[in-house]
Image: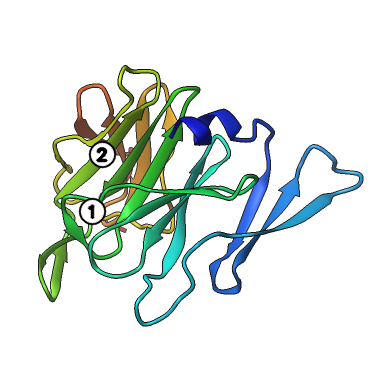
Amino acid sequence: LHSHLLLSPHLPFFAFAVPSAGYILLLDPTRPQAPSWSRIPLPLPAPGHQAASFSPAAASAGLLAFLSDASGHKTLLLVNPITRLLAPLPLSPTARLSPTVGLAAGPTSFIAVVAGDDLVSPFAVKNISADTFVADAASVPPSGFWAPSSVLPRLSSLDPRAGMAFASGRFYCVSSSPFAVLVFDVATNVWSKMQPPMRRFL
């Protein structure tokens, strides 16, 4: 964790992941007149019968998060594309199918959220809860743990392709059917819902 946070690039860039090909493309947006593209190998495990496959799920402060594709207790990999360092987090405590992932990295810590698509049976999912991983490299000793699960608001319908945004200690994501914005307060470990001024079902 400490190495990732110290070595994370502090310049803005766009990352286009091609996990099946084993590399990502980085675009430097600070040079609009002469775009700078870089092709960087990814240290992800190669797909195979005994190796899990991973898909890009979130990004923050130069770190990329990849989520295991297999259903069940998920593995979240943090990847630094510049140094090619890779750090797998402990297995998520709740079994899920295709959850929505949020990531917020700071100078000495990061928070990862894995929400929704709880596997209530081998053939059924419900948006019931979210798991939060909190890591702090500045604490003595450095710590990293899964916090107690939080309960999603009723009638939540998350889209993992939409991801989450983080600002002022809160994660935000979109819920559909009915449309709303879900808000997760990291400090209180509580979700809330912001309902838009529109008809609930369109």
Q: CA distance from mark 2 to mark 1?
A: 12 Å
**Vertical placement of 91 versus 55: above or below?**
above
Q: In the image as oriented, which residue stretches furthest toward the front?
A: 141
Under mark 2, the amino acid is: Thr
- Residue 182, image quadrant: top left
Q: In the image as oriented, which residue stretches furthest toward the bottom?
A: 49
- Residue 160, image quadrant: bottom left
Instruction: Report the quarter where the N terminus lies.
Output: top left
Left/right of residue 136 with respect to residue 201 in the rendered view = right
Residue 126 location (% of width, % of height): 15, 60
Residue 65 location (% of width, % of height): 45, 50
Left/right of residue 69 with respect to residue 155 in the rendered view = right
**Foreground pick, 38 / 31:** 38
Looking at the image, is mark 2 or mark 1 nearer the viewer? 2
Under mark 1, the amino acid is: Gly
Residue 137 location (% of width, % of height): 39, 25
- Is any atom of residue 199 visible in this view? no
Residue under label 1: 116
Q: Residue at x 41, y 52 (%)?
A: 77
Residue under label 2: 132
Please name the colour scheme applied to the rendered image: rainbow
Instruction: Report the quarter where the C terminus lies.
Output: bottom left
